[in-house]
Image (cartoon, helix red, strand yellow):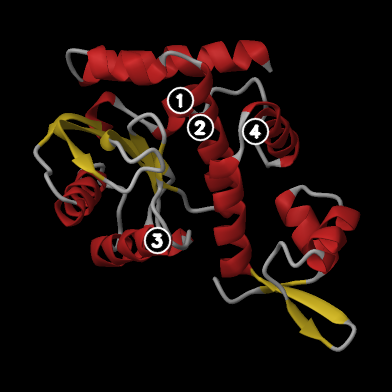
Amino acid sequence: MPHKMYTVEEVAEYLHIPPEDIRRLVREDAIPHIQQGERCLFQRKDVDAWATKRILDFKGNDLEDYHRITSAKAHDLSRQHAIIPELMRETYISPELHSRTVPSLLRDMTDLADQTGLVVFLDDLRQSVIEREKLGTTALTGGFAMLHPQHHEPYMFEDSFVVLGRTIQPIPFHSPDGRTTDLFFLICCQDDRIHLHVLARLCMMSQQTSLIYELRAAADGEEMFAALCAAEQEIIQKL
């Protein structure tokens, strides 16, 4: 339900941010909100987009702190729990994508997602990923991207999962550093909290370990999957 509305207290609980911090963000006009008289409301789709961008912009201690907070309160997720083996398989990885443009890459990645057998509505997923990319690139410095749908709806998937594609030839993907991109994660989660947790963890793995180098050096999907699991364990040991 992307149109669900939250109060200050509800959005604070949803994002694992103290209510006073939410009120400060509102005063600074730093978080999307709707003012109805004395009431301040937040639309879920706007909150999700804001939170996702916030995580992608996190570096170092900020990223670790947010990951630690969401891990402690998010259902069956915890700091010491390895989530990647639950959401990925070797068969969810394509080490030789032939994509050469942004449209072909989005098509190929959503096709890869469909091959998991967990996608219920492929057309909806594809359009949602396209719409999310129109809001701003999900590419990050270092030659990798964190694709995801604009909204995270339970009906779209049978379960949450992540797929990974490596293109044969790096492609222009509007990376902040102006360089090309060759590694593409597609995060498909039924639940927004799981999405934010997984996004934070993948960002930590990519930024704080040698994962990106290992994924490029890997000979096949089996080695890429092993690199992912090893990088997650390295992060868990630091938490």
Q: State left or right for residue 176 relative to residue 54.
A: left
Taking depth in this image into account, of 28 and 119 the one nearest to the observer is 28
Category of crowding for the residue at label 1, using alpha-carbon neighbours closer than 10 angstroms: few (below 14), some (14–19), many (at least 20): some
| Residue sitting at the far front | 178
- The Cα–Cα distance between marks 1 and 4, rounded to whole angstroms, is 12 Å
Say whether marks 1 and 4 touch (CB < 8 Å): no
- Residue type, label 4: Leu
| x 21%, y 52%: residue | 102
Category of crowding for the residue at label 2, using alpha-carbon neighbours closer than 10 angstroms: few (below 14), some (14–19), many (at least 20): many
SS at circle 4: helix
| Residue sitting at the far bottom | 37
State the mark number for residue 63. Answer: 4
SS at circle 2: helix
- The Cα–Cα distance between marks 4 and 3, rounded to whole angstroms, is 22 Å
- The Cα–Cα distance between marks 4 and 2, rounded to whole angstroms, is 8 Å
In this rendering, the answer to whether 30 lies above or below 238 is: below
SS at circle 1: helix
Taking depth in this image into account, of 206 and 79 the one nearest to the observer is 206
- Residue type, label 1: Ser
- Give the image location of residue 221, x and y in percent: 22, 21
Nearer the N terminus, badge 1 or badge 4?
Answer: 4
| x 19%, y 48%: residue | 105
Q: On the image, numbered disc 1 is attached to which residue? A: 206
Say whether marks 1 and 2 touch (CB < 8 Å): yes
State the mark number for residue 174. Answer: none
- The Cα–Cα distance between marks 2 and 3, rounded to whole angstroms, is 18 Å
Q: On the image, numbered disc 2 is attached to which residue? A: 203
Q: Name the quadrant containing residue 155.
A: bottom left
